[in-house]
Amino acid sequence: MKKNIVLFVLFVLPIVAYLFFASGVNSFTKLPTITPKIADFGNWKSLKGEKVTLNDKITILGFSGTEILKNRGNFFNLNEKIYQRYNGFKDLQFVVICPLGTEKDAEKIEESLGAFTDVSGWHFVFASPEEIKVFYDQLHLKGKLDQDLGTPNVYIVDKERNLRGRKDKEEYKEGYNTFHPSELSNEMLDDFKIILYEYRAALKKNHNATKEL
């Protein structure tokens, strides 16, 4: 009996501990707020002519810039690693802010995604360059838009319009680089799961759990 206990301590316990920490300590905490209460969108329209809002939605927010076709691979990475996995949740939306004049390019991206994905959760919305700059500036992020008004990063915004991420100095993260699939599969997926867990836990606590999350 003692021998079995010793073997368990020497071999099994270290493996369990490794799996626990490898899964991410962040998975057991609340995801910090980087910027609270960001502004909602202006009277901007989507490809379907609809007004999109950040209110009461978990939003994955991106900025395409004018070179949307050149960077189309980033959208496919995000679609594969995150969107397809969680598509169907009514409280989730993927919103890409695009400069006016890029509507046809955005439509091509949406059509390409639609060849193998239900794109009802994707929303490409359009604003003037100045509106995009003003909106991005109020996010108060360390990263900046490039000269084309775009960034490969996407951001997690909760239902209360708080931009969420990691605030620890050693692993500060305000956005997730869609150019790197591994970052989406690891850091972003871990953080996104925390957001979903927060809302599911709240719904369960209020005896109102639904499949919307």
Image (tube, rainbow, N blue to C red):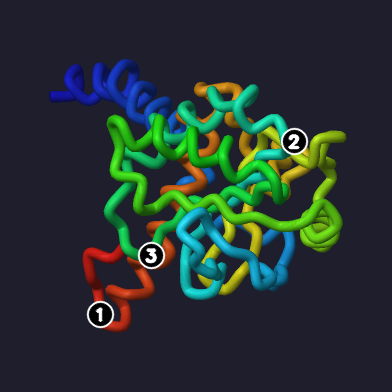
Residue highlighted by disc 2: 170
Question: Of circles 2 and 1, which is in front?
Answer: 1
**Mark closest to the chain's N terminus, 2 or 3:** 3
- Residue with the mark numbered 1: 208
Answer above or below: position of 43 versus 99.
below
C-alpha separation, residue under disc 2 versus residue under disc 1: 37 Å
Q: Are marks 1 and 3 in contact (CB under 8 Å)?
A: no
How many neighbours does mark 3 have within 10 angstroms: few (below 14), some (14-19), or many (20 or more)?
some
Q: Residue 100's x, y, as percent?
A: 71, 50
Q: Residue at the left extreme?
A: 1
Between circles 1 and 3, the one closer to the viewer is 3
Within 10 Å of disc 1 (Cα), the crowding (few <14, some 14-19, many 20+) is few
Query: Which image quadrant is residue 173 in?
Result: top right
Q: Across the whole image, how many numbered discs are drawn on residues?
A: 3
Q: Is 111 or 29 nearer to us in this picture?
A: 111
Q: Is residue 46 above or below residue 201?
A: above
Q: Is residue 160 above or below residue 102?
A: below
Q: Amino acid at mark 1?
A: Asn
Q: Amino acid at mark 3?
A: Asp
The residue located at (48%, 27%) in the rendering is 77
Q: Identify which residue is drawn at 49% across, 41% down.
A: 107
Earlier along the polypeptide chain: callout 1 or callout 3?
Answer: 3
Q: Where, quadrant-wise, is the C terminus in this rendering?
A: bottom left
Image coordinates for residue 210, horizontal then vertical, percent: 23, 70
Q: Percent from the top left, x then y, of residue 97?
A: 64, 51
Q: CA distance from mark 2 to mark 3?
A: 31 Å
Residue that numbered label 3 is attached to: 91
Give the CA separation, mark 1 to mark 3: 14 Å
Nearer to us in this view, 189 or 157: 157
